[in-house]
Image: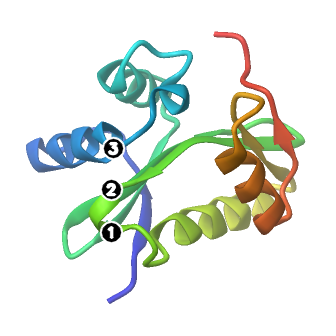
Amino acid sequence: MPVYVESIRTPSPQDSQDLAKIYADAPQWLLEPYGDAQQLIAAGLAQGTLIAGRFNDRLLGAALLTRGDSAWHLSHLCVRRITRRRGVGRRLLDEARRLAGEAGAELRLRAPQGHLEANALAARMHLPLDPPAPR
């Protein structure tokens, strides 16, 4: 079965548990500038920027997708540790790229500077890497 990417606006109780599990595996630098995973999730829901990958009715990965006029930024991408290396993150990136392209915008990654994981992902996906936006 494929991973379906969707915008999360009003999570079910199960979705809320899944989101907490996804970001429980995240390194602290990935949560910045938010104090913890709950703040990141709450901000994404409030701003309408939270997207997630669903497989068999469970959320396996999530990210924030901020839409702009000429560029969209994908940040805080995280996949549950037990489901990594199965294409969930790639599916989130591909769908974000497709949506940005349909809107006539470029997709860019946003992450703190100096983290090898973020640099490697940007290079592998051929995406520009920008520093975090001020809150």
Query: Mark 2 touching mark 1, by CB under 8 A?
Result: yes
Tell me the residue that label 1 is attached to. Answer: 83
Q: Secondary structure at mark 1?
A: helix
Q: Secondary structure at mark 2?
A: loop
Structural distance between the alpha carbons of marks 3 and 2: 6 Å
Residue 110 left/right relative to 135: right
Question: Residue 72's spot in the image, x, y percent?
Answer: 76, 43
Q: What label sits on residue 58 in the rendered view? A: none
Q: Secondary structure at mark 3?
A: loop
Query: Mark 3 touching mark 2, by CB under 8 A?
Result: yes
Structural distance between the alpha carbons of marks 3 and 1: 11 Å
Kind of residue indicated by mark 2: Arg
Kind of residue indicated by mark 3: Asp
93 or 8: nearer the viewer: 93
Disc 2: CA contacts within 10 A as few (<14), some (14-19) or many (>=20): many
Q: What residue is rendered at 83% in x and 60% in y?
A: 123
* N-term mark: 3 or 1: 3
Say which quarter of the image contains residue 133: top right
Q: Is residue 25 depicted above or below 39 in this figure?
A: below
Residue with the most extreme bottom position: 1
Q: What label sits on residue 25 in the rendered view? A: 3
Tell me the residue that label 2 is attached to. Answer: 80
Q: What residue is rendered at 65% in x and 69% in y?
A: 94
Quadrant in which the N terminus appears: bottom left
